Each structure stands twice: as C-alpha cells, then as structure tokens.
Image: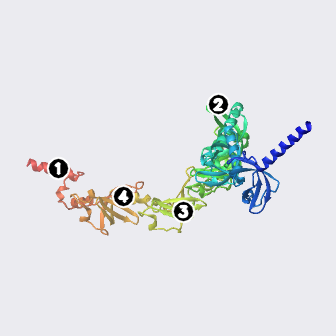
Amino acid sequence: MADNATGHENEISFESALENYLNPDFGDLEEGSIVKGEIVRVNDDNVLVDVNFKSEGQIPAAEFRDAAGNINVKVGDKVDVYVVRKNENEGTITLSFEKAKRMQVFDQLEDVQENNRVIKGHIVRRIKGGYTVDIGGVEAFLPGSHVDLRPVPDMDALVNQEFEFRVLKINRRRSNVIVSRRVLLEEERDSKRQDLLRTLEEGQIVHGKAKNITEYGVFVDLGGLDGLLHITDMSWKRIRHPKEMITMGQDLTLKVLSFDRENNKVSLGLKQLVPDPWQDISARFPEGKKVTGKVTNLVDYGAFVELEPGVEGLVHISEMSWTRKLRHPSQMVHTGDEVEVVILGVDGEKKRISLGMKQVRPNPWELVAEKYPEGTVLEGVIKNITEFGMFIGIEDGIDGLIHVSDISWTKKVRHPNEIYKVGDTVQAKVLTVDQENEKFTLGIKQLVDDPWGHVPATYPVGCTVKGIVTNITDFGLFVEVEEGIEGLVHVSELSSKKVKTPAEMYKEGQEIEAKVIHVSAEERRLGLSIKQIKSEDDDRRKPKEFHAGPQEAGQSLGDLLKQKFEESENA
C-alpha cells in the first residue's frame, strides 16, 4: 500500500515537472519590471542574458561598456535587467541593462528625496541656466542659483568636480531630476551658526575664510556667520586697500573685537593679534633722534615714512628742504626710497609722528648769515629776471634778490632786462639777510654813494638852475639839472597864466631856467618853478619909482602896489 502511494507521488511529481518544462510559468516577467538574469554569452556586438524565459534576451554590448570601451561583464555574472517587451507566443523577450540601472537610480533618488538624504553627483558640463550633473548614469539639472550660497565668480571651475546634492524634484515619465547644492550649504551654515552663536564671545580667537573684499574691509565666513574685518583693524601700519594684505578665499586667524548677539554682527581684528607698536613710542623715537625709514606713500602735503613695521611718520613738504620751494614731494623722494629723517614730534595717543628731512643737514641760511653779513660785497650770476628784480645765485639753493629799485640811484629802470640778461655776472652789496623768513636782498646802486646826498647843498631853495627837459607830462616837466638828477616843474609853476598842457609851451630837449622851490634828499625830490623866474624878471623891468623913497625901503612889491592903489583912490 505504501509502495503504491509512493509510486503515485512520483508520477505526479514527474508530470508536474514535465508540465512546467513544456509550459513554463513566466508570470513574473512583466513588461516594465526589473528581473535578475545570468550572462550566458558575450561578444563584441551583443550579450545574451538568461532570465528563465523561453529564450535568452539579447542586449547590445554597448550597454555594458565602460568609459574606456571595455565590456565589464563576463559569462556567469548575475545582472539586473529591465523587461522592455516579451512575446510569449513567439517566445522572444527584449531586455535593457541601461534601463534597469536607470530605473534603480530613480528608485534611489526617490528614496533620497522622501527621506531628505543626500546623494553624490558629478558635474558634467555647463548648460544654459546651470549645470548637468551625472548621478549614477542619470542626468540631473543643477540650476545656477542652487550651486552655492553666493554667485560663483568662475562657473567653469566647477565642471568635472564631485559634490553632494539634495534632490528637489523628480519626474520619471519625463526623466527629469532637479538637484540643489545650495540647500545643503544653507543647512550646514545654519547648523554651524547655531553652534557658533552658543560659543562666540569677545576676545575669542576664531578662524575664517575671506569671502568678500571691499574698499572698507573684508567679510569673513566664520562658519555659518559672517564677520567684518575693517581696514583699520587689519594692520598697525597704513594700508590703502584690503587687497594689499588679503586675497579672496584666504584662511584667516582673527580676534573677536565685538559681538552683537541680538543682530548677529561680529567685528574682527587682525592687528590685535600682535602687540601695538605704538606702545612706548616716545621712548623708542624721542624728539631729535635721527633714524632711517622707507617712503610708503606720497600725498600733496608730504611723504609717509615707515620707521618700523606698523609705525609711520609724516614728513611735511615744508620739512623736506631748507632752500627748495617744492610743489610736490615727488620732487624730492619716491615711494620705496630709503631716507634719513629726524624726529620732530611724537603724539602717542593720536599715533602721529612728525618727521623732518631737511633737519638732517645744517640750515644753509645760518651759514649764509655768518658768511655774508650786511654790507658784504659779492659777485654772483643772474639766474632769473622778473619785472620786480633779479635773482642772483649765492649758495647752493639760496638766491639773493636785487630789487629793481636797487639797481640805480638815478636811472628809472622799468624792467631789469633793459640793462641785464640771465647769465650776467654782477657785483652787489648785501643789504639784508632774513634767516627766519629766508630772504636775502642785495643792491647794486649801494656800491656807490647816493648822488642825491649832495643835492640839498648844491641846489638850495631859492637858487636858480638850468636844465634840459627830459619828459613832458600832463602834470608838468621833468628837467635834468645834472646827470641822474631830475627836478619837476609842476604845471602850476610853469606860468602865472593858466596852462592847459605843458606840451603847448615846451618840448623835450629844450633848455630852461628855473628856481628851486623844494628839495629833499630822503624823498629824492627837487621842485622847480619857471613862474617865479619870470616874476622876478618882470619886477626888474618895472619903473624905479616903484622901488625909490626912504619910506619904501624894505617894502615888498605887493606893499608898493597896494600903496600906489590907495594913492590913486585918494586923488
């Protein structure tokens, strides 16, 4: 009985196996599904995969080639394939290895998106509006606005780099995937900011990276929180722009100067990490000390000189030369020059040092004052001629001025170039040496005595002189009584009659006779009168009765005329 039962079971098992072989069940091989298959044959064109169907599926070998072109599977390998189409009647099936991978990647992407995880991708190329990112064989779109927290200066620099991304959107039907890197960076920044806010305090030493450079300072990313490094807190020495010290992306070690926790504002300092070089500055640089420094900057009013790192002083343009009148410091020094200076003043509180360059050498004006006291006669070459005088070279950088009025006692010099030219050697007498105002005056006429000195004695008031008319003006005649000495006959002294213009009566070169009515050597004036000469001549020609009689002795012409008038009245 048992044997019959066993035989019956074997018969059923055999029949079942035969049925399965003749009519296999392919119900799990549905189109659009992913199934396991075994590589049964590989050649250059195709790869056959057995998925337990009536026939093997044929897949183009190109789907299995790597970047180098090599087929990366072999017979016996198990692979996942995508069922594109099957025909049970004909017993054929179409498979795809790439579609299987793509479907699996989409599954992974959906999982990443649903669980808010990250996935790695490789930026392949730039396209309009962003980048194409390869994620396991699926091309995703990375918008330009989602690349970084701030605009990227060099977009091409990110190509061929690998990053982690968040999945923003998936559309399987259109095979569209949108990813973001910025979202991750924002999350990272927020996390770091919270950690930083809990621990940050004034005086703390922090590390950051320069993220933006402006004229007034550098914004530093401290890891989720930005701080400002102002230009005045970058160095103890003077800098014109932050770019002189810091470059974009540079790693920095800084000190927290202040922290506004309410507004999340952080002020940072770089120079505060080293001692203030202005401490005890007066002891290191006392007034009068001679030191050497480097010219760091030129401005219209002077030159800044670095005495040591972080310590600069100003040489004002007026302290550069004893003798030269400079329009700009570049006439004396240039940036980078090594110069010797003297400390003139130190203000430690305001961090200012006044320097002098001319004080390194003796003041030439002191030497000139000793060498050429007033009254000294010297020779010099005319260096420059102006309307008001001539400049004579005395010593290196020191010129003496001969004013136009000090050229001649007697000649009326309208312009020095009437007599002299540049390059002439002249002899002159030192008149004044004003060391304080740096003025050196000379005179040529002072080499001889003033001819006007004898004029009051030679031409006293009341004497008669003869002279030649040298110039006729509306107000009178200029008459030369001797070489270099001229007197003036004012128009009122020409005649007792009214004179419209002197030119009506006289001409230049005419000899005239006149009476001296005023003389002053100090004022260099000699007043003459022709009218009075004529009046005396008229008096001499009048009848003698006007002059006779004892009672008339000592009477003036006016008294006599008055007397005669009264007599005629009485008659």
The answer to whether mark 2 and mark 4 are in CB contact below 8 A is: no
Question: Which of the 4 image quarters holds residue 42?
Answer: bottom right
Give amino acid for label 2.
Arg
Give amino acid for label 4.
Leu
Q: Earlier in the sequence, mark 3 or mark 2?
A: 2
Give amino acid for label 3.
Ile
490 sits left or right of 226 in the view: left
Q: Nearer the viewer, mark 4 or mark 3?
A: 3
The answer to whether mark 2 and mark 1 are in CB contact below 8 A is: no
The answer to whether mark 4 and mark 3 are in CB contact below 8 A is: no
Type of colouring: rainbow
Secondary structure under the numbered disc 1 in the rendered image: helix
Q: Callout 4 environment at 10 Å: few (<14), some (14 to 19), or many (20+)?
A: many
Q: Earlier in the sequence, mark 3 or mark 1?
A: 3
Residue receiving disc 1: 562
Calculate the distance from the C-alpha at mark 1 to the C-alpha at mark 4. 34 Å
Position of residue 20 measured from the top left corner of the image (x, y, whole percent)? 78, 47
570 sits left or right of 384 in the view: left
Residue receiving disc 2: 261
Residue receiving disc 4: 526
Residue receiving disc 3: 392
